Amino acid sequence: MDLKEKFESASKQVMNLDERPSNDELLSLYSYFKQGTEGDISGKRPGMINLKGRAKFDAWAKLAGMSADEAMKSYVDLVESLSGK
């Protein structure tokens, strides 16, 4: 199975985890997924009132410059660790 297939499988598997990931784990999953599928973040940082949007923006922005393959691999590794594999 190549990386793209593993990534797609992990993105389905994450929906069926036994336990809900922590907020930090959710932000990591989100940022790796977005970096792997869309690349570096663009646009303006959400305003002060949108705490969730700011946290997601900041988590993704930290990955700027990371390759899509590296982000996909990190995503797959995180999903596997959360699922106990």
Image: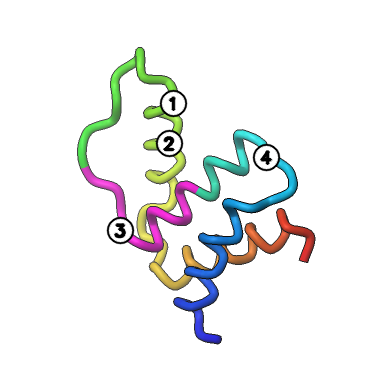
User: How far apart are the two marked residues, 1 and 3, measured between alpha carbons?
Assistant: 20 Å
Residue 83: image quadrant is bottom right
Q: Nearer the viewer, residue 10 or 63?
A: 10
The residue wearing badge 3 is 38
Q: Residue furthest bottom?
A: 1
- Mark positioned earlier in the residue sequence (2 or 3): 3
Labelled disc at residue 56: 2
Q: CA distance from mark 1 to mark 4?
A: 17 Å
Instruction: Point out the tag, 2 or 4, that comes first from the N-terminus.
Output: 4
In magenta segment, residue 25: no
Quadrant containing the N terminus in the rendered view: bottom right
Tell me residue 75's x, y (percent). Answer: 55, 61
Task: Decide whether the magenta segment is chiefly helix, strand or loop.
Answer: helix
CA–CA distance in space, label 2 to label 4? 17 Å
Query: Which amino acid is tagged 3?
Result: Glu
Disc 4 marks a residue whose amino acid type is Arg
Q: Nearer the viewer, residue 41 or 5?
A: 5
Q: Secondary structure at mark 1?
A: helix
Q: Which residue extends farthest front?
A: 16
Residue furthest to the left: 43
Considering only order in the chain, which callout, 4 or 3, is on the residue closer to the N terminus? Answer: 4
Q: Tell me the SS state at disc 2.
A: helix
Measured from the top left, where is residue 52 in percent x and y?
44, 26
Q: Amino acid at mark 1?
A: Lys
The answer for how far apart the CA atoms under marks 3 and 4 are is 25 Å
Asked if disc 1 and disc 2 are in contact, CB closer than 8 Å, the reply is yes
How far across and how far down the image is residue 16, in percent? 64, 53
24 shown above or below 52: below
Evaluate if marks 2 and 4 touch, with contact meaning CB atoms under 8 Å apart: no
Magenta-colored span: 30-42
Precedes in sequence: disc 1 or disc 4:
4
Helix, strand or loop under label 3:
helix
